[in-house]
Image (cartoon, coloured by chain):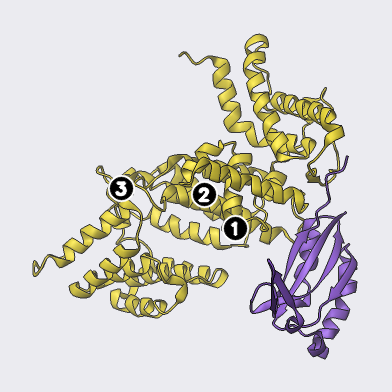
């Protein structure tokens, strides 16, 4: 089993309180789909809107997300899947891909002894 | 230096068996870098051993057994300080590691090809990996073919191999549900290799023969491994039919010749026959895709005695079918050229005018070039000259540039009244 972070990008400011009932229904249906494909969501988080973000670069503190973009990180989850192809299949089904997108990044595990 | 039989046998095995040997070794090594190293070593060892003991009956099996043994030895030695993530090998129905039975080596070439062409890898990385791992081309040669420095190409290959390992891209042939999409990525990689060799995007040589030969070799390998896939057949047909005209694309001085000016008697008859047969076969299966359709168009050109005697109506019909499976402004542009042969340049100009509004064709030199040619045929010289100049702004292949410059010179030759 390999672990991946799935980063969810939505149009700014990605406010979880303005999620539509339709989208919520899609989210609820997502969990069972993940399991049916052989994946497990280890843990996951939704974030407050990007208007609440604060970025620090060097010693400069600025209001807003680290990178100004039309789409911002709305949340992320850790996915465990047998291989990358399964992880991709699962990521493709995420409802965020409808008007935003997701990024799949393998988790780093330090080389073991 | 005299080339010995053994050297010839090793070189031959390199060309023919590299993919097979590397694919099998990668499965044992669990790592492409280690597999490459062991396979290289096996080829070096072959020179000595075969000189001493004679050339084995099955060179591929000998090389595979040797490379696998080296991989296993290295892994044992490294066991304690293993820093790399192993390649994710899907267990096989019959995992055979019995060195006493070299005939029983499973064919892992498809796994290797699908892994190299995984859609999560950038297209340029897919092409480079395929040349390096499937064809055994050296990094330096790949760099020269794609006009980048060797360190740049080496870095590109390393990055791709790292991603395969870190992201756990599995070493396997995709299942039935994923296959059409994944196969398409493989086919377009092979096709891109061919077109890069056939019309090199820049530089003086119109044909980089080595890439062309590699892509034909790959297409044949794929067809032998997937004999039931109509599109694999279609791709090989397309490459053969296009390549049949290779010798006549430029004249003795290296100038580009358009289809109607090419000496058809010099087209490669054997390639045309084989390609046309493959087209017929792939149409019989009923699941015709974009490669088979393009091959069918190419075969109509290849079999016609002259440009004028080409069945242009059927060409247009095939372009219509092609557009249905593969909507693309480039296909529409090519269709417009065929339309000009059926309904005249005027009708085609209307189609091209619509295409000119498509952003995807901005910067594509064939658009003004096609338009220029249609205007030239209508004797609208001033407009044609402007379009040739626009095409010249965008073209970067030397042979095509010279062709466009000559056409431009023809149309600006004022009031000569020369017909074409």
Q: Rate crowding at label 2 as few (under 14), some (14 to 19) or many (20 or more) other CA atoms within 10 Å.
A: many
* Marks 1/2: CA–CA distance: 27 Å
Q: Which chain shows up in yellow?
A: B
User: Mark 2: which secondary structure?
Assistant: helix
Of label 1 and label 2, which has the lower sequence position? 2
Of label 1 and label 3, which has the lower sequence position? 3
Q: Rate crowding at label 1 as few (under 14), some (14 to 19) or many (20 or more) other CA atoms within 10 Å.
A: few
Chain letter for mark 3: B
Between label 2 and label 3, give the one nearer the viewer.
2
B97 vs B120, nearest the viewer: B120
Q: Position of residue B8 (x, y in %)?
A: 54, 20
Residue B197 is left or right of residue A47, and the answer is left
User: Mark 1: which secondary structure?
Assistant: helix
A11 vs B216, nearest the viewer: A11
Chain letter for mark 1: B
Q: Rate crowding at label 3 as few (under 14), some (14 to 19) or many (20 or more) other CA atoms within 10 Å.
A: many
Q: Residue beneath label 1, please?
A: B284
Task: Please name the residue shown 71% across and 23% down the image.
Answer: B62
Q: Which mark is residue B250?
A: 3
Q: Which chain shows up in purple?
A: A
Is residue B282 visible in the rendered image? The answer is yes
In the depicted structure, whether residue B92 falls above or below residue B285:
above
Q: Residue beneath label 2, please?
A: B193
Residue reaching furthest front? A59
Residue B299 is left or right of residue B132, and the answer is left
Task: Please name the residue shown 66% across and 49% down the image.
Answer: B160
* Marks 2/3: CA–CA distance: 20 Å
């Amino acid at each position: 089993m390999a672990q991946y972070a799935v980063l969810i990008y939505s149009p700014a400011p990605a406010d979880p309180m303005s999620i539509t009932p339709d989208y919520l229904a899609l989210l609820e249906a997502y969990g069972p789909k993940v399991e049916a494909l052989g994946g497990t969501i280890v843990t996951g988080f939704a974030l407050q809107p990007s208007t609440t973000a604060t970025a620090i670069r060097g010693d400069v503190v600025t209001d807003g997300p680290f990178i100004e973009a039309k789409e911002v990180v709305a949340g992320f989850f850790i996915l465990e899947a047998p291989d990358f192809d399964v992880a991709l299949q699962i990521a493709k089904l995420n409802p965020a891909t409808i008007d935003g997108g997701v990024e799949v990044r393998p988790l780093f595990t330090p080389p073991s002894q | 230096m005299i080339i010995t039989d053994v050297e010839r046998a090793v070189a031959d095995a390199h060309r023919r068996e590299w993919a097979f040997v590397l694919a099998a070794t990668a499965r044992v090594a669990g790592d492409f870098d280690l597999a490459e190293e062991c396979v290289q070593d096996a080829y070096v060892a072959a020179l000595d051993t075969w000189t001493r003991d004679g050339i084995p009956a099955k060179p591929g099996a000998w090389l595979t057994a040797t490379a696998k043994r080296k991989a296993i030895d290295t892994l044992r030695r490294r066991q304690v300080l293993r820093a790399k993530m192993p390649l994710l090998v899907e267990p096989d129905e019959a995992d055979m590691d019995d060195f006493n039975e070299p005939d029983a080596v499973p064919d892992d070439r498809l796994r290797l090809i699908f892994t190299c062409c995984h859609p999560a890898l950038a297209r340029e990385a897919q092409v480079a990996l395929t040349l390096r791992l499937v064809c055994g081309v050296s990094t330096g040669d790949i760099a020269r073919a794609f006009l980048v420095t060797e360190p740049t190409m080496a870095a590109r290959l390393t990055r791709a191999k790292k991603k395969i390992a870190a992201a756990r891209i599995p070493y396997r042939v995709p299942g039935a549900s994923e296959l059409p999409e994944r196969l398409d990525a493989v086919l377009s990689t092979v096709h891109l290799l061919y077109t890069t060799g056939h019309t090199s995007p820049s530089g003086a040589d119109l044909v980089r023969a080595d890439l062309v030969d590699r892509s034909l070799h790959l297409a044949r390998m794929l067809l032998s491994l997937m004999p039931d896939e109509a599109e694999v057949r279609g791709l090989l047909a397309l490459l053969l039919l296009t390549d049949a005209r290779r010798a006549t694309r430029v004249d003795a001085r290296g100038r580009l010749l358009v289809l109607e000016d090419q000496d058809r008697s010099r087209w490669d008859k054997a390639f045309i026959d084989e390609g046309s047969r493959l087209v017929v076969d792939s149409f019989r299966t009923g699941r015709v895709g974009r490669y088979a359709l393009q091959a069918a168009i190419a075969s109509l050109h290849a079999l016609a005695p002259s440009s004028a005697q080409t069945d242009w109506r059927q060409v247009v019909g095939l372009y219509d079918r092609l557009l249905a499976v593969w909507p693309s402004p480039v296909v529409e542009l090519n269709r417009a050229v065929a339309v000009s042969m059926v309904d005249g340049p005027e009708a085609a100009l209307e189609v091209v005018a619509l295409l000119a509004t498509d952003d995807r064709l901005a910067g594509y030199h064939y658009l003004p070039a096609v338009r220029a040619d249609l205007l030239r045929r209508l004797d609208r010289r001033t407009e044609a000259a402007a379009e040739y100049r626009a095409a010249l702004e965008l073209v970067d292949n030397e042979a095509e540039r010279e062709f466009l410059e000559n056409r431009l010179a023809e149309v600006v030759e004022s009031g000569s009244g020369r017909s074409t």
